[in-house]
């Protein structure tokens, strides 16, 4: 019997690549979007779900359960970026970022768990970010929201083990997607004390995404994890230096690591 996979934010970017790859491998895939009518040409069904609105979460999962009678894999992929000096990002935008990147995945997990317990099986994959392993300049809010989801995954893993439900996180590096266009960018203010370094960092971040890796690599990683009997709690997918930066953070003194990051961003 084909496994049933639900991917939040499955209409574009990494989510779309994962869905299309799993379809080719024989999985039954459902993606989600706030505006599914915009994706009538999708290779798999796109259903309405806004991770900031709990009623849409419940409705979407119920639709999949009513149709397929199970949900084997949940991929929490929906997320948004935010850039800016922390001092200059409005509080409303900080909260909005956490609503999508942190509270949204929590509520989707809560909604799918009763069905997975009923099945006595399930796999939940949280798509986080390598940025979640370190506080990056002018990406501090994004780093914090993704880092919080990494820690939450660890706690969930221990709580869900008794129900034969596995949960894992995959932290991607830079991939060639349209994430930059969906970010909230704090404006570069003419009289801001952060103007020059923020402006330069913003250009560097956009270039990293434009030159990023093929999202197909993420799709293949998800496929491998789905087929593991005992997946690890954390995975990192990206270029060598991006993954190695996490290792360096563990072994280097804090100030030396901070200096290394500041040199990288030319601060």
Image: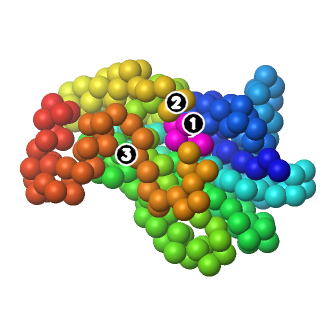
Q: Mark 3: few, some, or many residues within 10 Å (few <14, many ≥20)?
A: many
Q: Is residue 18 above or below residue 4?
A: above
Residue 103 in sight in this render: no
Whole-angstrom CA distance, mark 2 to mark 1, is 7 Å
At x 90% / y 55%, what residue is drawn?
66
As drawn, 158 above or below 143: below
Q: Callout 2: helix, strand or loop? A: loop
The picture places residue 231, in percent across and down from the top left corner, at 52, 58
Quarter assignment of residue 189: top left
Q: Which residues are magenta?
A: 218-223
Q: Residue at x 37, y 51 (%)?
A: 132
Q: Residues within 10 Å of mark 2 (few under 14, many from 20)?
A: some
Inspect the magenta stretch and tell me whether residue 226 lies in it: no
Q: Main secondary structure of the magenta part?
A: helix
Image quadrant where one finds the C terminus: top left
Residue ID for mark 3: 130
* Secondary structure under the numbered disc 3 in the rendered image: helix
Camera-side mark, 1 or 3: 1
Q: Which mark is residue 215?
A: 2
Going 13% across and 54% down the picture, which residue do you hit?
A: 252
Point out residue 116 in the picture as x, y percentages from the top left corner: 73, 66
Query: How many C-alpha atoms fall within 10 Å of the one at disc 1: few (<14), some, or many (≥20)?
Result: many
Q: How many marks?
A: 3
Q: In the image, which disc is placed on residue 219?
A: 1
N-term-proximal mark, 2 vs 3: 3
Determine which of the numbered discs, if any, sits on residue 171 in the image.
none
Callout 2–callout 1 Cβ contact below 8 Å: yes
Instruction: Give how far apart the Cα atoms at labels 2 and 3 are.
Output: 15 Å
């Amino acid at each position: 019997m084909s496994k049933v996979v639900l991917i939040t934010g499955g209409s574009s970017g990494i989510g779309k690549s994962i869905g299309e790859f799993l379809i080719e491998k024989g999985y039954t895939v459902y993606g989600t979007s706030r505006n599914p009518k915009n994706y009538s040409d999708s290779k798999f069904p796109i259903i309405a779900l806004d991770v900031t609105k709990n009623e849409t979460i419940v409705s979407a999962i119920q639709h999949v359960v009513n149709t397929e009678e199970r949900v084997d894999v949940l991929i929490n992929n929906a997320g948004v970026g935010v850039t800016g000096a922390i001092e200059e990002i409005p509080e409303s935008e900080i909260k909005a970022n956490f609503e999508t990147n942190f509270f949204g995945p929590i509520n989707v997990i809560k909604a799918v768990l009763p069905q997975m317990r009923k099945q006595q099986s399930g796999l939940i994959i949280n798509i986080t970010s390598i940025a979640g392993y370190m506080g990056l300049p002018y990406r501090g809010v994004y780093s914090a929201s993704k880092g919080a989801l990494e820690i939450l995954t660890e706690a969930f893993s221990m709580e869900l083990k008794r129900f034969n439900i596995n949960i894992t996180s995959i932290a991607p590096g830079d991939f060639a997607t349209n994430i930059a266009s969906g970010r909230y960018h704090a404006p570069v203010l003419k009289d801001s004390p952060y103007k020059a370094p923020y402006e330069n960092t913003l250009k560097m971040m956009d270039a990293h995404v434009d030159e990023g890796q093929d999202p197909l690599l993420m799709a293949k990683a998800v496929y491998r994890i789905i087929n593991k009997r005992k997946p690890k709690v954390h995975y990192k997918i990206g270029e060598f230096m991006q993954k190695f930066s996490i290792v360096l953070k563990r072994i280097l003194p804090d100030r030396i690591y901070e200096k290394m990051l500041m040199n990288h961003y030319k601060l």
